[in-house]
Each structure stands twice: as C-alpha cells, then as structure tokens.
Image (cartoon, coloured by chain):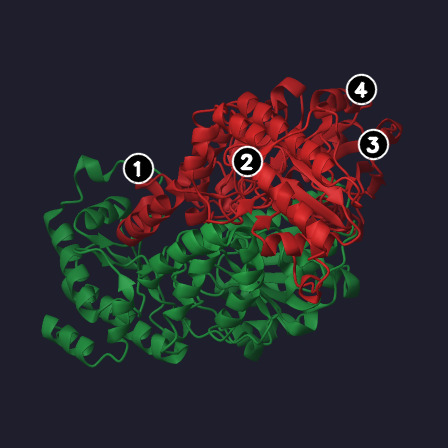
Chain colours: A green, B red
Amino acid sequence: MTHLTLADCRAMDARDPLAPLRDQFTLPAGVIYLDGNSLGAMPKAALARAQEVITQEWGTGLIRSWNTAGWFELSRRLGNQLARLIGAGEDEVIVTDTTSTNLFKVLAAALRQQQGVAPQRRVIVSERNNFPTDLYMTQGLIELLQSFGGARYELKLIDGPQDLAAALTPDVAVLLLTHVNYQTGFMYDMAEVTAQAHAQGAVTIWDLCHSAGAVPVDLNGAGADYAVGCTYKYLNGGPGSPAFLWVHARHQEGFTQPLSGWWGHARPFAMEPGYDPHAGIKRYLCGTQPIASLAMVECGLDTFAVTDMQAVRAKSLQLTTLFMDLVAQECAGFPLRLNTPVDTRHRGSQVGYEHPQGFAVVQALIARGVIPDYREPRIMRFGFTPLYIRFEDVWNAVAILKDILLTKSWDQPQFHQRGAVT
Amino acid sequence: MTHLTLADCRAMDARDPLAPLRDQFTLPAGVIYLDGNSLGAMPKAALARAQEVITQEWGTGLIRSWNTAGWFELSRRLGNQLARLIGAGEDEVIVTDTTSTNLFKVLAAALRQQQGVAPQRRVIVSERNNFPTDLYMTQGLIELLQSFGGARYELKLIDGPQDLAAALTPDVAVLLLTHVNYQTGFMYDMAEVTAQAHAQGAVTIWDLCHSAGAVPVDLNGAGADYAVGCTYKYLNGGPGSPAFLWVHARHQEGFTQPLSGWWGHARPFAMEPGYDPHAGIKRYLCGTQPIASLAMVECGLDTFAVTDMQAVRAKSLQLTTLFMDLVAQECAGFPLRLNTPVDTRHRGSQVGYEHPQGFAVVQALIARGVIPDYREPRIMRFGFTPLYIRFEDVWNAVAILKDILLTKSWDQPQFHQRGAVT
C-alpha cells in the first residue's frame, strides 16, 4: 500500500462525480458527520416542503388536503419512488408506520403462508446480533400466538453467517436477516442466501435498514419474499420518518396481515363494519399516517434523483476502503480491532472498530466535531454516506482519531459518563 | 324557544371567555371550519416548532438531538401533558404510533388479562357503527390467533347503546366502545358503562378519538381499563399526528403487549437479543417515532394551556345547542333528520343530520366555504371546536345551509361526483 496523503484525498474529491450532490444537504459547520447510517443529514429541500405541508396543506387546505394535496396516496407514491433504489416494481412498496410494526406485519404474513403449506415448520432463524427490535418483534408475535394456545414457534439465533447453512433445517419456516448488519457492516449476498433458504423450504424476510440508499439492492432479482426498512438513515427522510415495506407480488394477495386498519381496506370511506383488504400492497397499510414526517421522505428520496445505486456503491467502497487504509496507516499500534469485512462483496457502507474504551473515544471524537456512533460492545461505528461525505472528510476524521488516541484525550471523566446514547 | 338573531350570536361571542383562544390558530379567510373533529386547525405555534425541529434539531443537532433535544422522551412527555385532559395520571399515557396500532396493543393486553382469569370469556363486544378501524383491528387480531390454532374469539356488534346491557353476557371478555360516536355524536357515560362492564366481568377499552379535547374525560375517575385516541382532531396535533394510549396503572405491569419493539425495552441501547419490557407505560412503545409530526402535538396540546375541559365543555354545549336551535328555526321543512342526541348528557361536540342528498349538500357547503364532513350513509357531520369556533360562525353556517337547501344549489352535477371523500 502506498502512503496516502491529504493531497490524495483531495484529488479523489476533485474527480468524484457525486461531489456536487453534497450541496443538496445542510451540514453544520465544523462537523464531520459519519453517522448518516443512524440519522441521515437534512436535505435543504426538507424545510420548504414541511412549511408547505404545515401552512398551505394543513393551515389553509385543512381537511380538504387529504384529497387535494394527495395525502391519501402519499404512502404509495413514495413507495413507488423508493422502489427503484431496492429493485422493486410498481406498487410493491409502501412507506408507512415503523420498521418494527412493518416487520410484525410481514412476519405474520410469512408464517401464515408457511402454515398453509408446511405447518410443521415452526422455527424462525435470525442472528444473535441482528438489530434487536427485529428479534423483539419476533418474540412478541411468538409469545402472542403461544399465550392464546396457538402454534408454538421458536426463534433460533445463529452467531453469524458461518452458521447459516447448518441452521436451515427442515423445521425452518422463516429466515429473518438484516441485509447489512448494524454492528459489523457485514452484507449478505441476498440472491445466494434467498436461494439457499428457498432450497430448504424457508421464506425470507430482509431488513434493509442499513441497505436502502447505501448499497444496491435487487429484491426482485434475488427472488426475495418480504422486506422492511427505514427511511431515516441513508434515505435522509428525517428523524423517525415512516418506514417501508415490500412484499413480492406473488405473495401480496394470499392473505391479509393482522394489523388490518382502515387504511388497508378496499373501501375505507364506505365505513363498512367488516374488513375487506385492498388489492395488492395497500393492504399492508394500517392507520392514519403522520403527514409532515411522511412528506419529507420525498425530499430524502429526491437526493438520489440524479444518481443511481451503482455510482453510490462505487463511491461508498472508495470511502470505506480509504478509511480502513488510513486507520491502518495512521493508527497502527493502537488497540483498534476492525469488525467490518475487508471483502467488498460483504461490506456495507460503514466501518466499525472495537476499542477497549470505545464509548469514551466516541465521546471524545464528538467533542472534536467528528460524529460516529457507538454500539455495544465497545464498537465505534463510522458510517459513510456517499451523497455528502468527502474523501477529505475521511482524512480529517482519521487525523482527529489519531490525535485523540495519541494524547489519550478520551481518558477524561466527562467522556465516560453514559446517558442514553444513540 | 325565542327567535334567535345574528345579534344574539354576536352577544354570545362578546361574553365568551374562550373567545381570545381563537387567535392561537391560523384559519383561512372565508372559511367556517366545522370539521375540527376530523382534522383540527393549525396552531400558529406549529410552524415555528417544526422549523426548529427541522433546521436546528435535525439539521444542526443531527443524531445528537435524540438526547439533547429530548426526542427519546417526547412520547412520554407529551403523554403527561395530555393526561390532564383525560383524567389520567403521571406516566399513564404515551403519545405514539396510530390509533389502530395502539388499539391492537391494548386489545391484545386486555384479552391476555382475561385469558389469565377467565379463559372461557371469548367475546369482544362493540358497536356496528363504531369507527370501522376499531372493528377491523379487532378482526385482525381474532383472525391471527385463530389462523394459528389459538383461542377462537368472536366480535359481537350491537346496534346501539340500547342493546348494551343485554350484550354483556358471561362470555364477554372485552367491551370496546368509542366514547363519542363518530357518526352520531352519542356519548356514553363512561363511569356508568365501565361499572356495568366490570359488574359482568368484562374489561373496557375506550376509544377517545372524538372525546379528547372535546369533552371532559375522567379515565381514572371512571375506573376504566384501557384507552386509545388520536391527537389530530380536537387536540390539533396536525395531519396524522401520532396517537395516544392509556393503561390503568393496575394493568401496566401485568404483561407485555405483542408489538414489543425496541422503544419499549427496559434497556434499548444495551442491544440485548432478548426482550425485557420497560417498567410502566413505556412498554407500549414500539418503534422509532416520526419526530417532526410528534413534536407538533405539543403545540396542539398547548392550545389548552389557559383553559380547562369544563370551560371547553360549557362552550361546546352552547355551540351545538345553538346550531340545533338555528337549524330548527331556519331550516324547518327541509328533509333534515337530526342524528345526534338532544340530551346533553349524551352529546359530544358534533351535530349530525341525515339528508337524502347529504353528500351533495356537503359538497355545496364546501364550495361556499362552510366545511363540515360527510359520513356514510347520508350524514352531514358538523364539528364544533370551542377553541376556535365563534357563535357568529354558527349563525353564518346555518344561513348558508338554508340558502343551499332553498335554492337547491346542491342539485348540480359537480356536487354529486364522489372521489375519496374524507
């Protein structure tokens, strides 16, 4: 590896075709934001859109805006806009509710599907270090069914990708995986794993929280079954913006999902006492959506308008590779343990390092204007969002990290106090 | 009844202690807004709050705002602010998700509770003209349990309050009622009905969508069990703003609800693979909330800051009584059938009339700047929100209604075209 310099990084910025996209975002001065994988930065357009929703659509349009401003169709319209980023087709995606709630819907649908053809399959396989809410929602559904005397399902957790093949036994109903792991950045080969699951009779649910807008995803190409994900990370939809849900067209009409609220009804305004599911993906809608937050999702999706996921991926790999190389070059000798795959086929858009004082080092970084995030245990997680992170930012982040490690400036009491850390 | 005049209405405005509160809202010129029971008007403070959330908290604070801007605690903080309007105590209410989703949570909890003490109770009683999503969510849960071989529950629908006593048979587990009916404005005596249900061994779920901010509610005083409701009607939280959920303290710790997402975990950032519910009401949280929409709920709740529900109720009854009296005085002879109780003990804050051409008359009213809403079948629903409706507005609305009925201006083709009407 040749010695990398600041000049090299600036040269990479100079020839970066995505460089102009940074101007779409508001980024605070003096901050290098490496946490877009937790909360994406604010598109400049978001403020004007919110003002329009609040003053014109709500303030002036009032109730009429459900029709005149298209609020009723927003979940579907945004789903169609998002679809092209994840290899989905028209009317296969909706933007609604939370990732957790959407997971409950598709997990119930997937189990129901299996119940019809292979009722002996009673195992849901996932990973121990999957993002916890996926496991909690699964446990909630299992516990619900069981506590009312219904089928007894079991959640089996594997320790990592190496244990997947052995876990796909004939009793597995559903394989529930996060495509890019939140902790390690490990990315599954979606097509390969889906085929592997199908060969064993299992259906797949993919959590795309750390994939959508970060890496190319091809749900239909992979023949996947169900997917959920959030819009507030790489999709820049805003804090807690509504999540999305995808169901392969072949599964959409099979049955209804249990959170069968009025928005998923075929004729919501007929006010009929009996539920009759809407055709297609709309049956996965439930209740009235938070319009201000939902509307800003469009601004986030618009930031991808003049690029595509291949270009985003190319820069993402350049950024993560540069970061790894610079840490190796500048911070050798410090107790940093890379927890992210070097193999680019299995790498998302983040890089993680364990450090014995990971929490305190992260706090010291934040105090110096470099914002990564911290994840138990001891993991410093650096997210690289190609739409607004520059190669020079990577250089500067590593320089500050090195300085903190060298001077042990993290070894001060204020960096060890834990609040609710995000 | 003495003959009412415009001067009488103006005199009522002149001595209305709530009159100054109208100035807290943005209302479009030339509009008499009688649909605050579907979507409340916009508090002027909402725009500034949204701008702060978007530019400062999101744009500048970025991920740090989960702590520094109090986003994590918002659901609970708003719940505590809302509590005083519905007779709830500290940490008994949270603002989160949708009414539909929250209903699923509390219905599952209520059935679970009954399952533990009276498993033979397998009936959920509700009303045929309850707001449909309550029935749909109930059907969804019943269907879910049954399709996996679990307990078979049945939803029994009564035709109205007169059938309630007979319906409370020994097999009833849960009585699910909307406190103020969306269609008729009929209000149940919550304390009386709760006692009646409890005497028969049933637990109660109250939907407060048309009560919260509209009529005094005393959940603890009534000894109620569970309640849900929305914040975007009389509470003026904004389009689709997150809903609320209340659980009586005696039921909170009994069990967990099935939508057990990470926000309801005792230690969400410990990232443990096993779900462990948070103490108290927080276990009813699920996924990450839409912060921009959630934050504006506070502006809606703030509009009640300098009044109380007794004062709001007094004006509400004056408004609905005036409207009924004026319609009787001005529109006698037209085929209008009142569908709202005259008895103020059973009247919410809305007045409904059936008219053979109800849909078209509502469209003609909207074209003239009077906005009520339309509900199947043939019901024109007029909502009266005491914080911003004037007695003079009532006079003018009835004058325009009379003019439309007299000139049959509703009998034109454009008023008969149905889109998705809200």
Quarter of the picture containing the N terminus of chain B is top right
Badge 4 or badge 3: first in the primary sequence: 3
User: What quarter of the picture does the C terminus of chain B occupy?
Assistant: bottom right
Q: Amino acid at mark 1?
A: Arg
Q: Nearer the viewer, residue A169 or A211?
A: A211
Horizontally, residue B10 falls left or right of residue A317, namely right
Q: Which residue corresponds to mark 1? A: A418
Rate crowding at label 3 as few (under 14), some (14 to 19) or many (20 or more) other CA atoms within 10 Å.
many
Kind of residue at disc 4: Ala
Q: Secondary structure at mark 2?
A: helix
Q: Quadrant of residue A340?
A: bottom left
What residue did someone put label 2 on? B392
Q: Distance of mark 1 from mark 4, alpha carbons?
A: 49 Å
Q: What separation in Å lies between label 2 and label 3 (alpha carbons)?
A: 47 Å
- Nearer the observer: mark 3 or 1; the answer is 3
Residue A165 in sight from this viewpoint: yes
Residue to which mark 3 is pinned: B172
- For label 3, the SS is strand
- Residue B65 badge: none
> Which one is nearer the viewer's eye here, B321 or A76?
B321
The chain identifier of the residue carrying mark 3 reads B
Label 2 and label 1 in one chain: no
- Percent from the top left, x then y, of residue A174? 64, 61
- The residue tagged 4 is B199
| Image point (74%, 52%), residue name | B358
Q: Chain of mark 1?
A: A
Distance of label 4 from label 3 (alpha carbons):
11 Å
Q: Quadrant of residue B286?
A: top right
Residue B303 picture quarter: top left
On the image, the x and y values in percent for residue A262 come to 68, 53
